[in-house]
Image (spheres, rainbow, N blue to C red):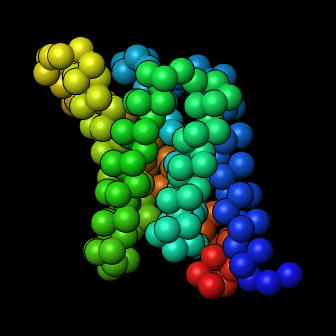
Amino acid sequence: MTSKYYKLIFITMLASQAVVISLVEQLLPTPFTFAPGAKLGLGNLITIIALFNLSTKDSAKVVILRLFITTFLSGTFSTFLYSASGSVLSFIAMILAKKLGPKRVSVIGISIFGGIIHNIGQLLVFSFIAQSLVVLNYLPILSFSGILSGLLVGLSGNYILSKVSHFKYIGKN
């Protein structure tokens, strides 16, 4: 099999893992009792793995596949809007943070930044739908949950990346 097919298989494997993790996470009660509706964002663990093992273009494919398949299996149009805004902004932010280099920002820092930006994206869409900026008052609470979930995902991602570093040879070709 050529490296093109290995890369395609790797992308679809990561996307399917992200979908399963996201669907399972929807079944779990939220650990953030102080922030109703906030989730851990465990699917972002796969985004972190993709960012460090694939090109930006291929990582975007993983994020987009996860977004559409998860929404198709368990979401509505409004959840798609919230998820899309958070995912796209978070992905862009994590790419930019990663470009700063490992001496300036760690995997954990990239994950925390992504978690906070994801929440900002969702709140911006909600404020647009609600036609009110008052909902942005929820930002400090969601930022705190973004920091906590980003920390957890970043720690997990750091550990997993140390174990799957050999996949870089598949994804970067």
Residue 3 point in image, percent of width and height: 74, 83
Q: As displayed, is residue 136 above or below residue 89?
A: above
Comparing 142 with 168, the one in front is 168
Classify residue 134 as left or right of residue 51: left
The structure residue drawn at horizontal position 42% and vertical position 59%, both measured from the top left corner, is 108
The structure residue drawn at horizontal position 77% and vertical position 74%, both measured from the top left corner, is 5
Residue 146 point in image, percent of width and height: 36, 39
Comparing 6 with 119, the one in front is 6
Residue 26 point in image, percent of width and height: 61, 26
Q: Quadrant of residue 53?
A: bottom right
Classify residue 67 as left or right of residue 12: left
Q: Is residue 101 visible?
A: yes
The structure residue drawn at horizontal position 40% and vertical position 54%, both measured from the top left corner, is 91
- What is the tally of numbered marks visible in this picture? 0
Classify residue 58 as left or right of residue 13: left
Q: Quadrant of the N terminus?
A: bottom right
Q: Is residue 155 visible?
A: no
Q: As displayed, is residue 79 above or below residue 119?
A: above
The structure residue drawn at horizontal position 56% and vertical position 67%, both measured from the top left corner, is 58
Q: Quadrant of the C terminus?
A: bottom right
Q: As displayed, is residue 19 above or below residue 33?
A: below
Q: Quadrant of residue 98?
A: bottom left
Q: Quadrant of residue 61?
A: bottom right
Residue 42 point in image, percent of width and height: 56, 42
- Residue furthest left as drawn: 133
Comparing 162 with 139, the one in front is 139
